[in-house]
Image (cartoon, coloured by chain):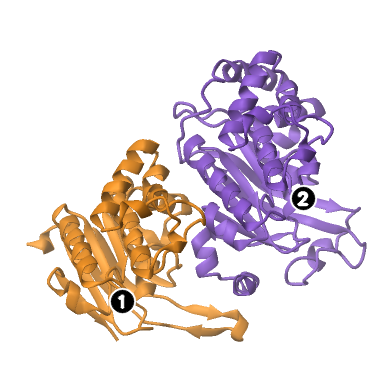
Amino acid sequence: MRDEIKTSLADDRQATEKNSSSLIPHPSSLSSWVLKAENISKRYGPGCSYCAALTGPEHNTSQCRICGTVTACAALNFQLNQGQILGIVGESGSGKSTLMQIVNLSQRATTGQLWYREPATNGAGSEPLDLLAFDKFTSRAFRNERLGIVHQRPELGLNMNFTVGGNVAEKLLLARWRNVGRIRERTSQLMELTELPSQRIDDDPYTFSGGMLQRVQISKALSSHPALLLLDEVTSGLDVSVQARVLDLIKRLQWELKITMLLVSHDLGVIKQLASRTLVMKNGHIVESGLTDQILEDPQHPYTQLLVSSAL
Amino acid sequence: MKDELPALLEVSDLQKEFQLHLLDGRVIRPFSGISFKAWSGKLVLIGGKSGAGKTTILKCIYRTYLTSHGHIWYDSLEFGRLDIAAATEDVVLELRERELGYCSQFLKVLPRVPALEVAAEPLLRQGTSRPEALEKAATWLARLGIEESRWQAYPVTFSGGEQQRLNVARAFIAAPRLLLLDEPTASLDAKSKSIVLEMVAEAKAAGVGIVTVSHDAEALKTLADDTYLLN
């Protein structure tokens, strides 16, 4: 199984490197899913038989009062289709970032399955892979080659001691690119795509503004042609004018490159403009899911109604 | 004659309830048991005063609102006859992209995106190439009387009437099969209004089914094939 994945990833890398002059990875087919979560749970702590009964939105806590275990994600089910953006909203501590880290394979889920299917190239979808069954090495290879993540704070996603070009090259090297000329070419292409001045490729990150660093992170995330882009609060901390440009960029990436994205945000305005479907989380549970405009204009769950009516 | 053709849209016994959990679970029913049909190339006009639930009907058809009771049968090109009220989210998204056009009362778009791109958005979403989409958007904006000097401006800086026209352009540009128009002529001057009416007439002649709600029934009366009044 592991070897199979390795060869498929290696083939893909060759294809990627060959096509690196065009930024368009795959043609889209809307109906097929890329990521499917089944009963994903994450517990911080030993857990006891009362946890399930004592936590959740109806108790307004995710911590069990018997054993103190925090259930950050409780039996989550969702599906992410190719080319779509799935929004996740919820208050602090509702399990959004834990979910993001589970998908990024940097946290292990306690139970559940996370299925991934390589986006279809010509209508025929490939075999689904269970990401949580991967060992450490396969997980790392998968993360480097098929996933891209943009963290809330640029310092988390970038090495501030490397140049901007070096940061993007780091991910490409991990994705087993070896040709320096190609790596630089790809990096400057991405900088142009994200509207960064490509002559600044050898500058240090601290000479860039926060919004520019966010775009460097996006460049880095996109560098190895990820099938799935994870965006964690991409616009929080940015001033509104830069925020508008980052949002515009994300929207264009979706239209022009048909990249599938998972978008975590506090900001309902961001979700509204970008996500086609939205999950609302509270205390580790998905309390409501649906089309984004339906969630925002016709919320069904009391918590969603509270959330929507509290937005500016 | 028209009764022999299958209806493009058949709303039967539509009911919508809003449960306000923040107000002790109070339930609001704007209307009960709405039924009507719409055909390709025909215009259905729904009139009524503010708060009667006109927009609610359109939003139920567009699935922005979940239907509480009843069916919304739509004869889709891609999926065949289906009930929008019960369709899966993926089907609804696909329908919105390819077959349904919705002109809302208010324009809400990403800030700092030029008007021309805002108008081209539905085409870009469908996968039309950028130059082609922008060119088409330009013809629509020119037709709706938005000056060329303003195409690169951001829609926030537009007047109410200009925003409304941009909204209309967005609904028409992707050549939908079913157009849902929410007050298309509100806040427009006489000249723009006549242009919009001309566009509606053209779409009708091209075989688009149209459902429009308006309290300005006079303007659309001549185009309407069926008129309903919501009480």
The subunit letter for the residue under badge 1 reads B
Q: On screen, B30 above or below B42?
A: below
Front one among B181 and B225: B181
Q: Residue at the front extreme?
A: B149
Front one among B197 and B14: B197
Q: Residue at the left extreme?
A: B1
| Label 1 residue SS | strand
Q: Colour of chain A?
A: purple
The answer to whether residue B81 shows anywhere in this view is no
**Residue A48: quadrant of the picture:** bottom right
How many other residues sit within 10 Å of disc 1, few (<14), some (14-19) or many (≥20)? some
The three-letter code of the residue at mark 1 reads Ile
Instruction: Determine the residue positioned at 35% across, 72% down.
Output: B57
Front one among A37 and B215: B215
Q: Which quarter of the figure is the C terminus of chain B placed in? A: bottom left
Distance (Cα) linking label 2 and label 1? 45 Å
Image coords of residue A75 (percent x, y): 71, 54
The answer to whether residue B100 shows anywhere in this view is yes
Q: Colour of chain B?
A: orange
CB-based contact (under 8 Å), mark 2 and mark 1: no
Instruction: Determine the residue positioned at 26% across, 52% down.
Output: B142
Residue bearing the label numbered 1: B34
Look at discs 2 and 1 and give the one toward the viewer. Answer: 2
The three-letter code of the residue at mark 2 reads Thr
Q: On screen, A53 above or below A45?
A: below
Q: On screen, A172 above or below A155?
A: above
Q: Locate residue B229 relative to residue A21 in the image: left or right.
A: left
Q: Locate residue A4 relative to residue A71 in the image: left or right.
A: left
Instruction: Determine the residue positioned at 16% across, 70% down.
Output: B224
Q: Which mark is residue A98?
A: 2
| Label 2 residue SS | helix
